[in-house]
Amino acid sequence: MSGVAVVGAGAWGTALANVAADASAAPVTLIGRDAAAMATIAAARENARYLPGAPLNPHVTPTAALDAVAGAEIVLLVTPTQTLRAVAAELAPRLKAGAAVVACAKGVERGANALPPEVLAEALPGVALALLSGPSFADDVVRGLPTAVTLAASDETLAARLAARLATRSFRPYTSTDMTGVALGGAAKNVLAIAAGAAEGRGLGASAVAALIARGFAELARLGAALGARPETLSGLSGLGDLVLTATSPKSRNFALGRALGRGEPAPAKLAEGAATASALVALADAHGVELPISRAVAAVVAGRVSVAEAIEKLLARPLKAEA
Ligand SMILES: NC(=O)C1=CN([C@@H]2O[C@H](COP(=O)(O)OP(=O)(O)OC[C@H]3O[C@@H](n4cnc5c(N)ncnc54)[C@H](O)[C@@H]3O)[C@@H](O)[C@H]2O)C=CC1
Ligand SMILES: O=C(CO)COP(=O)(O)O
């Protein structure tokens, strides 16, 4: 396993391209859809729009040519969740035989209410699939700060080979075979981080944020059990680990969106996967008879159906019940 292509040249795609190049001197291609933007990145050796101040590793070649995936044994798919199906369909005829595709998005596809591994299994039949998730800000990773993530594949050997190929001194992938648990944790934490940000934005205090994290984790655990996820996955890096990071850090775009909503300010013009995922996560839970009050409140707020104040009022008025 050597050649790596990264599809999606935003913050996370750019950071992962550098990781793959740091991990091995083999060539890495960073593929974006905007030819002018990719030419600018190639000339500046920096993705100034999405990851300013981080020089590209010399072994990374930026391009807008999707055909470049044909040379890669490993393709990291790093576009937003709602674009995965369409991007995968474009990739399908171009993939090298035997190439592995690693989904790196965190969300639930609206409409199908499907997690990234399910979307890719449908869009890329017969392709070896894996999933990379966990607590990891692109900005931390690209600066070489210590980061641990989960690399999941139903084929344990594939997960181990991918982890070995992508590991660096500071970027540590742990392997898992629980694709559902890893995907669900990444999707849910973005929704719950919006709730935590909203609580902070309305000045509800650190105790309220801690309560939202714990009760949010209970929502993840309930839905995880219904979907067959392993409890230890949900309490691991890609579940609780990423929930704690995202729900407590103003650096998170989902937390920042929630905080803006809580303060009554305009939403920042940045990707916040939880906004698109909230209603799909709730629909997925409804289909399994699982109640997610906090996620449902986030879905209602981002859709503009209720205010943050009304959503909080409703959550606090819920009947008292046993914690577990
Ligand atoms: N930024 C981070 O720290 C991390 C992000 N992620 C996940 O990675 C995924 C991508 O996030 P970021 O790179 O941060 O977002 P971003 O907003 O920085 O970049 C998104 C990229 O996707 C491209 N894109 C959008 N629609 C596309 C389409 N239809 N076809 C091709 N390219 C398209 C955009 O042009 C842009 O280059 C999200 O699911 C996010 O949750 C996961 C871990 C860390
Ligand atoms: O997934 C992330 C950290 O693990 C990034 O979080 P945001 O998308 O909220 O910035």
Image: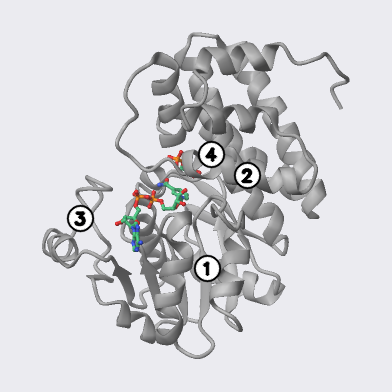
- Mark in the foreground, 3 or 2: 2
Q: Is mark 1 within 8 Å of ligand 1?
A: no
Tell me, yes or no, whether the two marked residues, 4 and 1, touch with CB atoms within 8 Å. no
Kind of residue sitting beneath label 3: Glu
Please tell me the numbered disc located at residue 190: 4
Gap between marks 2 and 1 measured at Cα = 22 Å
Query: How far across and how far down the image is residue 92, in percent?
Result: 46, 81
- Mark in the foreground, 2 or 1: 2
Q: Name above or below for residue 184 compared with residue 260.
A: below
Query: How far across and how far down the image is residue 150, in percent?
Result: 61, 55
| Label 4 packing within 10 angstroms: few (<14), some (14-19), many (20+) | many
Kind of residue sitting beneath label 2: Leu
> According to the image, label 1 marks what residue?
102
Gap between marks 3 and 1 measured at Cα = 24 Å
Count how many numbered circles sit on residues in the image.
4
Q: Residue at x 67, y 19 (%)?
A: 211
Q: Is residue 164 left or right of residue 249?
A: right
| Label 1 packing within 10 angstroms: few (<14), some (14-19), many (20+) | many
Give the residue at the far front of this rendering. 305
